[in-house]
Image (tube, coloured by chain):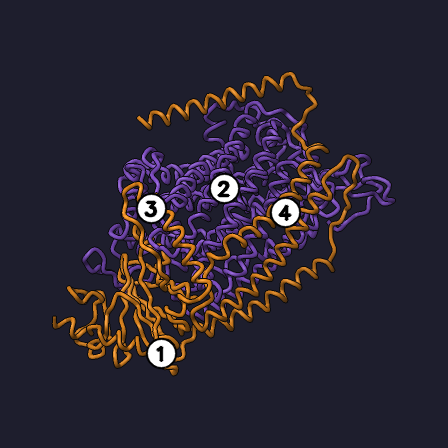
Amino acid sequence: MSAQGYAHPVTHDEHEHHHKETFITKYIFSTDHKMISKQYLITGLFMGIIGIAMSLIFRLQLAWPDKQFTIYEVLLGKWGEDGIMDPSVYLALVTIHGTIMVFFVLTAGLSGTFSNLLIPLQIGARDMASGFLNMVSYWLFFISSVIMVMSLFVEAGPASAGWTVYPPLSALPQAIPGSGAGMTLWLVSMTIFIASSLLGSLNYIVTVLNLRTKGMSMTRLPLTIWAFFVTAIIGVISFPVLLSAGLMMVMDRSFGTSFFLSDIYIAGEVLHNQGGSPVLFEHLFWFLGHPEVYIVLLPALGITSEVIATNARKPIFGYRAMVASILAIAFLSTIVWGHHMFISGMNPFLGSVFTFTTLLIAIPSAVKAFNYITTLWKGNLQLNPAMLFSIGLVSTFITGGLTGIILGDSALDINVHDTYFVVAHFHLVMGISALYGLFAGVYHWFPKMFEGRMMNKNLGYVHFWITAIGAYGVFFPMHFIGMAGLPRRYYTNSAFPYFDDLADVNVVISIFAFITGAAQLVFLYNFIHSMFYGKKGPKNPWNSNTLEWTAEVKHIHGNWDGPIPEVHRWAYDYSKLNKDESDYVIPGQDFAPQHIPLQDNEEEMNH
Amino acid sequence: MTAFLYLVVIILFAVSVWQMSKILSMSKAGEDSSTSQIANDKDNKINGKLMLGFVIFIYVLAFISFYKWSDVLLPDSASEHGVDIDQLWLISMIIIFIVGIITQWLLHYFAFKYSGKKGQRATFYADNDRLEFIWTVIPVIVLAGLIIYGLFTWSDIMNVDTEDDPLVIELYAYQFDWRARYAGDDNILGDANVRLIEGVNQLGLDASDPDAQDDIVVNELHLPVGRKILFKMRSQDVLHSAYMPHFRAQMNCVPGMVTQFSFTPTKTTEEMRLDDEIIAKVEHINSIRSEKNVARAIAGEEPLELYEFDYLLLCNKICGNTHYNMQMKIVVETEDEFNEWLSTQDNFATTMKN
């Protein structure tokens, strides 16, 4: 299949050297995957700052609902007069926080960054299959980010119907002010985002299938690439469905159709819409929405697999089981969407089916967790910041995943659906886990992104430990207020004396949130400072096996100055011993990179 | 003015960060050039120990949370099916905690035990089919048990047998309040449509439908204890969700369709108020409220009322600005009390006449 892929035009780089790059072609409209990955990362981090800042603002409101804070007036303007937050802006904040974190940070910022950086470098390609489409993909993402940020400034406020934008609330400006111009911009932004994501994903799939270097069979691919590849496939399958839902929503909002609307009496008048159903929207939304969880998570798990194996100085345990579980998760992720809708009014029998498929997904997830733990066993763990974040990911993935067993069970979901129990669950399992994956990736591949410069490890340790404690401090207690029956998306709980005793839990959560938020400043400082002043490390700082570390430290178009290395083994020959077990296969070196041919005194594995 | 102050603070903060970075880079220039940003034995040792500390932190956090906050959790179920849900919940929780405690321990303990040392040799261990088979099969068996148990519970709850002769009540949601409609003597809800909403006919009942004449619309939900209730949910404008946490009951209210949920309340409001858990909870809440009242008195505000327990119906689907305060009181009482209360309410025919 990939026979043609081996033959790379050697003339390519000679030709490249001739043409002089301008500032614009190098830094702005670049078609080089390394530059595009940096553009994705920095845009994603910028959006992340906005998203996390929003969460800190509404945590302030949730912890001290009866206090006045001038900061509301400063940041929210007319919605924070006299230091009192307006309920509509609270809903706007949670909506945009969710949208930004899920799509702009954890989809584009995580998968966009590392798919772009690592796919060509780890499979041994000079660039993506189409550099131009790749550039278009980034710029569409950039435009959609700009529109989303712009929507914060429209007069009636941004979209505020929750990140799931369920109609009729999101379709009717009479129902909530944010469903006017703010929601229109949300839809425009997401449409462009989906176009960006599709162009990116198609490019990743084609690149992985066709541009692998000689010897790089699919079963020799690092798990990072498997994860990015499968993520791209789920994206291509599910994002168009969200687009169709979005288009129908546009029709309902602007052209008088009734896909999602029926029998509505609002603001003193009956609407003409008849025959539609909001449940249809829920189906379409979650057909993307659930795979989206894995679009966010799989790249993080891929990064973790690579980082854990490298830093444990051991092969990843059960490589084939890991690949199989990625594929199983991807397949199952497309048939579990109904577990978000157990009590939406859909047929209870469907609920049973979705309970069954949902709990099945726990099996490949459990296999992954056990395999990570076994990879650590009897290792020689190099606890670099990236490794700490990877271990942290496994920890939050287990904790958050386990509560999924409760929420996936339709009978149990009845009483905790849409409570803070859900919020705690998904933040741990996809929010925090995926963020840890992002951080692990940044710490690990920073030298690859910024021409050998490394991030400060001590600041990295400070960043990790405060974040790790803070994340559990925020989300563990949150399960309790959910089990107490507190619904999410409440501007304040003070309307119910019954919830008065939850006030101090909310204060604890918020304090942990502020501490965790502050720790991210350490990361930002470290990131920006190291970009310019970071110490240059060795070419292969983590003694890693994968091909990206054989590429030139200085970024050149085409990645390798000479011919592309040929691959002779899988990516995980760490601490492999020679036949008589007297030393490593390469004496004195505990790793055998993929481009090193089989040694004389080495037993061949079937990788 | 305050905006200006904030701006100054931000600028000063930026300047200080910049200065700090300069100091850092200056101090680095003097350092030995061999200091690298790659973890060394010392880093491994410290972080390995911290990993062990971290798993203990997780355990302690869990323990403290349970110790401090188990009294905020919902009391025992006040409905028949809720007992099954609570049972399944408990079993799932026990499994989760066992698995969580073991796996977190292994993960962090290995991170501590095998933290890197110069010269330490990692074991090349790439595969073990039997081990992987075991930890695939164990989750399969455990999950199969949970799935089967869960599915039986679920279908028991969701399949309503009309032969039980349930009391039919409509829950009607609109921004931002609830109405309840009792089906009256015939126990059949009359037809209704949003297009018929006019004046006092707030729920859009069809005045020409004979079944509608004896329907009773109220804004406080009364339920007879021990009788199966079949709720029919309707929404007038956007999605709402009828959430009755004490009864382990929830169903979305969807404009354009009628959804349903059924349960049998088992404890009256009075009985619930005498429940030990509820007594403790109410005392706790009232001590918080009287503390607040001290502060309110100083500020010259009106004091908060003392809290008394009542069952609640909450909206649990984001529905607009006042979503956080869309509630209705539920009163569970004996059959006699219920009938007496119901007889004092006007039915639809009477309301329309007045």
Residue receiving disc 4: B55
Spatial separation of the CA atoms under disc 1 and disc 3: 42 Å
What residue occupies the far left of the structure in this picture?
A: B354
- Numbered tag placed on residue B166 in the rendering: 1
| Amino acid on which disc 1 is placed | Pro
Q: Which residue is mark 2?
A: A512
| Residue A465: image location, x then y, percent | 59, 38
Chain corresponding to orange in the figure: B
- Tell me if mark 4 has few (under 14), some (14-19) or many (20+) residues whose alpha carbon lies within 10 angstroms of its own: some
Which of the two labelled residues, at mark 2 and mark 3, occupies the earlier sequence position? 3
The amino acid beneath tag 2 is Phe
Q: Is label 4 in a helix, a strand or a loop?
A: helix
Q: Indicate left or right for A39 with A395 as reference.
A: left
| Mark 3, secondary structure of its residue | loop
To the question of a shared chain for discs 1 and 3, the answer is: no
Q: Identify whether A413 is placed above or below A136.
A: below
Tell me the kind of residue under disc 3.
Ala
Q: Colour of chain A?
A: purple
Can residue A575 be seen?
Answer: yes
* Marks 4, 3: nearer the viewer: 4
